[in-house]
Image (cartoon, grey):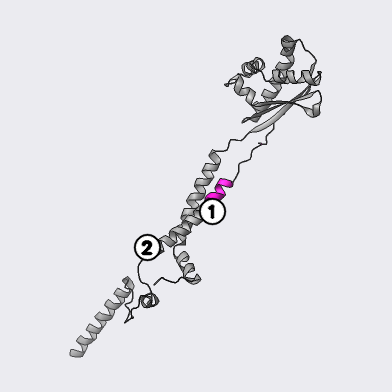
Amino acid sequence: MAKEINLRELYNILKKRFWIVIIITFIAGVAGYLQNSSNTTLLYQTSSRIIVGANADYMNTLRVIMRDTIIMEKVVEELNLKKSPESLAGQITVESIDNSQVVRITVVDSDPVLAADIANTTATIFKNEIGNIVNFKDVSYLSEAKINPYPINTPSNRTFHIAIIMGLVFGTGFIFLLNSLDDKVRSDREVEELGLTVLGSVSKMNRRNISKNKHRHLEIEYRGEDVNA
């Protein structure tokens, strides 16, 4: 006969071993927090602006040259960077603002100071070298890149929250698994559900009860000796 479980019994089962849920959830939460922190590299973005006196068609050519190896190599050398020119070019975005002659050189890096240095150095080297490359000199500074202390990718707590939820679910499930494997009979009701009759019960023995019974036995013996005397 299947055992019927009501809400009170469910509550008592959870209450008895709720410490298991707390421990599992805590461990899962710590693991989720560490995993979330280790996978997040903060990135910082900043931009320098220059004015390039060229028409739209020629502007496209000049934007390509800004990220070309010939410019990137000089930036790497100037800043003594430990990365390849191709890798550096991947950190840089060059675009015209509102189809104007204002060109924005945007750099993303894990170091906000270095991001600003790369943006400003790229603008300077492009201005100094473009005349030697395509005989074009109509380039002037508009604004330099500033150090941006605020990352563009804030750490997400999604992994941490998922770990907490999974900890609660697994902890609760583990409690019910332990309960289903526990075949001890703890109440008269459980005995009756097995189709048996309760004839009596034995109180739980502990040190206090044993000591109390021992003193009572000695007292009876002592009184018996007095009576016989």
Task: Answer with the quarter of the image where residue 213 lies.
Answer: bottom left
Name the residue rendered at 73%, 13% in the picture. Answer: 130
Find residue 92 and name its label.
none
Q: Callout 2, which amino acid? A: Leu
186 sits left or right of 18 in the view: left
Query: In the picture shown, does residue 190 fall above or below 134?
Result: below
Q: Nearer the viewer, mark 1 or mark 2?
A: 2
Q: How many marks?
A: 2
Q: Where the C terminus falls, by quadrant?
A: bottom left
Q: Tag 2: Cα neighbours inside 10 Å, few (<14), some, or many (≥20)? A: few
Query: In the picture shown, does residue 16 fall above or below 82?
Result: below
Q: Label 2, on which residue?
A: 181
Name the residue rendered at 74%, 26% in the picture. Answer: 95
Query: In the picture shown, does residue 67 fall above or below 15?
Result: above
Task: Quote the CA–CA distance across marks 1 and 2.
Answer: 25 Å
Q: Label 1, on which residue?
A: 165
Q: Which residues are magenta?
A: 152-165
Q: Secondary structure at mark 2?
A: helix
Residue 156 magenta: yes
